[in-house]
Amino acid sequence: MKPVSAIDLYKATPRTNCKECGFPTCLAFATCVIVEKKPLESCPYLTEEVREELGSRIHEQQSEGVYVKRDLYKITADHIRERIASHDFSAIADGLGARYVEKDDQPHLSLSYMNRDCLVSKQEIRIDGTPADNHWDNILLYNYIHFSGTEPIRGEWIPIDNIPGHIPKKPELEHGCEQKIASHFEGKPDRLERAAGALGAQQVEDESNADVALSFLPLPKIPFFLVFWDAVPEEGFEARAKLLFDRSVTSFLDIESLVFLAERFADTLIEIDENGARA
Ligand code: SF4
């Protein structure tokens, strides 16, 4: 049986965009039900017949992985791979801080990604010799290549607020990176320094009385500057962390990929702290 698409479900809604389901439009509701498994019952205006018939078909297709987010990521990764098919790797390597390599008569870019060796061809990405199976890693790295940035690193740190399109992404950066680092390393700045050192980050001078200030290159032309202030319980201050970016960052990545990279950075620091090394 043909799977139920977001459009099929949209057509079954009253299409009044009344927002009672918590979504701004009926189409947004339909997309989130199909892709993110939001409950069909959130719309009180679907008929019993629609709920029963479409509900069981949607449940069945989701258990088979049809249309769910995982597939969308794969589709996006495949789309970006197509877009870089015509890129001349030898011409863009320098600008990206990568090395051009020919292997099996195919062009490749060799670069460091989260302090790991990454080899990118137009067909696949290998990280430390293993195919990258996370679609987000693929999307991020192909995006970096697609941008084909050439700007030099400016050495001027900016917050996410100075990056176009930051408004919906700022909370993700705070929750997925800054607050995560702050709460995990609260009372343990020495462990943050150790984990960061193991990842290849460098301690830097900072004038903001931070307990830890360090810079890290998750990608060759994308430096991060992390500042951490430990909690001061007697003064009622909780631990805080702030991540800053070089002013040139928008030449190298879109904000979505950048926030993903920041979340990866936080998760890796915590992983190293908990396991003594990366898995
Ligand atoms: S509650 Fe139903 S009709 Fe109202 S916006 Fe949501 S999907 Fe559309």
Image (spheres, grey):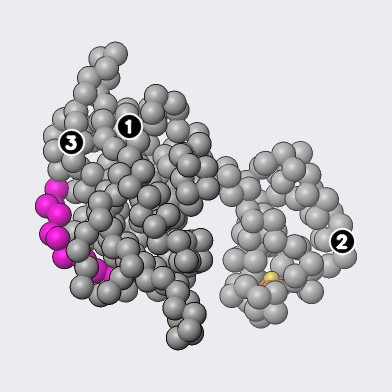
Query: In this picture, which residue range is highlighted in magenta?
Result: 150-160
Front position among marks 1 and 2: 1
Estimate the x, y position of residue 32 in percent, counting from the top left: 63, 60
Q: Nearer the viewer, residue 174 or 8?
A: 174
Q: Is residue 75 visible?
A: no
Callout 1–callout 3 Cβ contact below 8 Å:
no
Q: Type of residue at label 1? A: Asp
- Residue 151, compared with residue 75, is above or below; it is below
The local secondary structure at tag 3 comes to helix
Q: Tell me the residue at 14%/48% (across/down).
A: 150
Q: Tell me the residue at 35%/44% (across/down).
A: 199
Q: Is residue 94 rendered to the left or right of residue 172?
A: left
Estimate the x, y position of residue 160 in percent, counting from the top left: 32, 69
Q: Type of residue at label 2? A: Glu
Residue 127's tag is none
Q: Tell me the residue at 67%/41% (across/down).
A: 65
How busy is the neighbourhood of tag 3: few (under 14 within 10 Å), some, or many (20 plus)?
many
Question: Does the magenta run of residues contain 188?
Answer: no
Q: Residue furthest bottom?
A: 235
Give the residue pinned by disc 3: 93
Give the residue pinned by disc 1: 117
The local secondary structure at tag 2 comes to helix
Give the residue pinned by disc 2: 49
Q: Nearer the viewer, residue 250 or 239?
A: 239
Q: Residue furthest top?
A: 104
Q: Type of residue at label 3? A: Ala
Instruction: Say which quadrant the N terminus sits in.
Output: top right
